[in-house]
Image: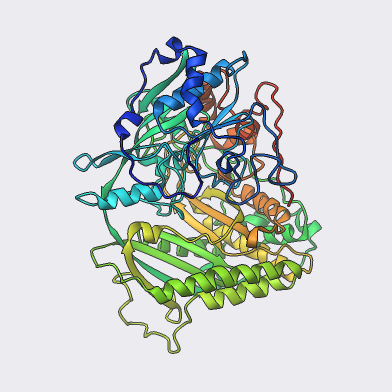
Amino acid sequence: MPKHRLDQQQRATPGIGARCAHPPSTFAQSVSTSALEAIVAPIELAHDAPAAHFRNWAGVYHSDAATHDGAFAHTQRRVFAPHSVEQVVAIVELARRGGAHGTTPIPVRAIGRVHSPSDLPFSLGWSIRTDELQGVVHVDADACTATMLAGTYLETITHVLAQHEPPLGLHNLGSISQQTIAGVISTATHGSGIHFPVLSAHVERLELVCPLLTGAQVVTCSRTERADLFNASLCGLGATGVIVSVTLSVEPAFRLEQMTEDVPLHVLLGDTPPPSSLQPEILAREPYTTFTHNPAALGVLLAAGVDLPPAPAYAPPPRSVSPSNVYPYVPVEAPCAQPVDWNAGEATRAVQQRIEALVASAEHVRLLLFPQAEMVTIDRARRTEKPADAPSAASALYHRVVHYHLSQFLLFSARFHTGLPQRVARWIYRWTHASPPRVPREAGAAPPVEDLAPLSTSSAVQVRVDAAPNVFNFDCLFPQYTYEYAIPYEYAGAALRALRAWLDEEHARPDGVRPHFPVEVRFVDADGIYMSHCYGRKTCFIGIIQFRPYGWPTSYRRLFQRFEALMRQFDGRPHWAKTHTSYAVELAQRFPHLGDWRAVQAAYDPHQILVNPYVARHLLDTHSAGRVSLFKRSKL
């Protein structure tokens, strides 16, 4: 049986040329079922092997009932760990035929690091673990491209590119690099930078194993070859084909100089507006202009448990000119005027202007809101030729002891009393963030980073220079429930003011929800990818979390339900990797190419064997031709 464990370090292995070789297009038609079984037998994991049982990083979804109470069951469960493209073709073809003795196709799903907090990675039938299908196949410094197998971790890719001569790197990264490149692409993972698109937009070429009517085979696609399949697969949710190879655009390696500034929340979001004199039930019946002029009123309703007014009927962005229009986004017509102006109020307009000035001041900007401490951390980074700072062993030790162990213990303790979460959040913030200067900086003094002025002369400012991946990545600490929504960039100020008012109201109520920290805010450019969160518009991502210290459950359902209701007011789109309650009718109003995506999915997977319950539930409004989903959330 193949050796496999989820957190293994990927290392270069010999014979990568043979492992990425394609079988002939007639392979599926010419090989018998018994021969296919012989091919997959050495890579099938035994049912009692640890790697045959998996759960997502949050610990919410598990692959079988034996490991956790209240989990889900499987039909004809088999788990494979292929290390060659031919083996993937054999698995998919065998599933298409219904296995050794079947006649009905069996569901099959490719799985990477299972980082998604939702049930997106899971299959009711067979699973393909892609961690062994790894390795950087080829790097072309002249063309600035790199080709790798689909199960290669981002951290492996960045390491190989950095070791190349000349050193190379990816254009952008998200918060973590412990993900497979296929998983990153399938969910249109993003970093932060208003002039940088989702990571999928940097893909030049894909190779997928598709279960066609004539048999499973490797299909190549790009902007110029099968552009419809290419576009659909750049955020394909694993349903348009099993990705086996990816060619990415890269650039010369670079370092980033990041300035981190901690300022009071009111410096960015303005003063908290006075609470409405109206009772929430009366406020809910006010004209919608009440909320567009004062978005904080939405927060008052949320905290009171009063239903928000119906969200405006936002028009989706125009369709893009063609499937090959991946990035930049080029619409066929001018966008429709939207029904509300969220910057109508003077205070909100001022906040939006401050946010836009911040986002424009550096290449990569990220906000971390700590509403319990009434503080916000502003990370601004840009490329630099300065040498990297020397690593600090003392700083690494402090981070491990205080950020990780002490924070986890305090968050665990806060589970036992409703008055503790807010206090714990303030304590942790104080211990993990720099203190403001005792004497304010002089107004005319040179900024800590050239041409990058802090928002306040009294703010704590830290500057670091490091290799880009080290700055892009962010320690997510321990398991957590997480929710993230993508809203139009121009609504960022209004949404954050409403979010702040809501959380303030919750903290003031004895029975209010007790969110953890931080609220992460990032900014991404528009693209033309059919199902990308950023399709057709510059985007502000807002994410909230509830930690699970020591893997113990914490209350999160009411918090996330209210957050989702708030984001819908601002034309929010759910992050595909997260659990959400958006379904096809609503999503069609957000994604004008949903029909195109469905058509591609049906054409390249006519038996729907790559459609799992998540995809069927949210994008197809069906449980996949009568298959009843057996997935359930673990006991929380």
- Number of marks drawn: 0
Compared across the picture, whether 385 is left or right of 290 comes to left
Q: Residue at x 78, y 69 (%)?
A: 510
Q: Residue 302: x percent and y percent?
A: 72, 57
Q: Is residue 600 visible?
A: no
Q: For this rendering, which residue is in front, 263 or 70?
A: 70
Q: Residue 373: x percent and y percent?
A: 60, 74
Q: Residue at x 55, y 21 (%)?
A: 95
Compared across the picture, whether 507 is left or right of 180 comes to right
Q: Residue 326: x percent and y percent?
A: 38, 35
Q: Quadrant of residue 622?
A: top right
- The image shows residue 407, relative to residue 15, as above or below, that is below
Q: Residue 134: x percent and y percent?
A: 39, 39
Q: Residue at x 70, y 22 (%)?
A: 626
Q: Residue at x 30, y 79 (%)?
A: 446
- The image shows residue 75, relative to residue 459, as above or below, that is above
Q: Is residue 629 visible?
A: yes
- The image shows residue 45, relative to residue 256, as above or below, that is above
Q: Residue furthest front?
A: 1
Q: For this rendering, which residue is in front, 36 or 438?
A: 36
Q: For this rendering, which residue is in front, 253 or 523?
A: 253
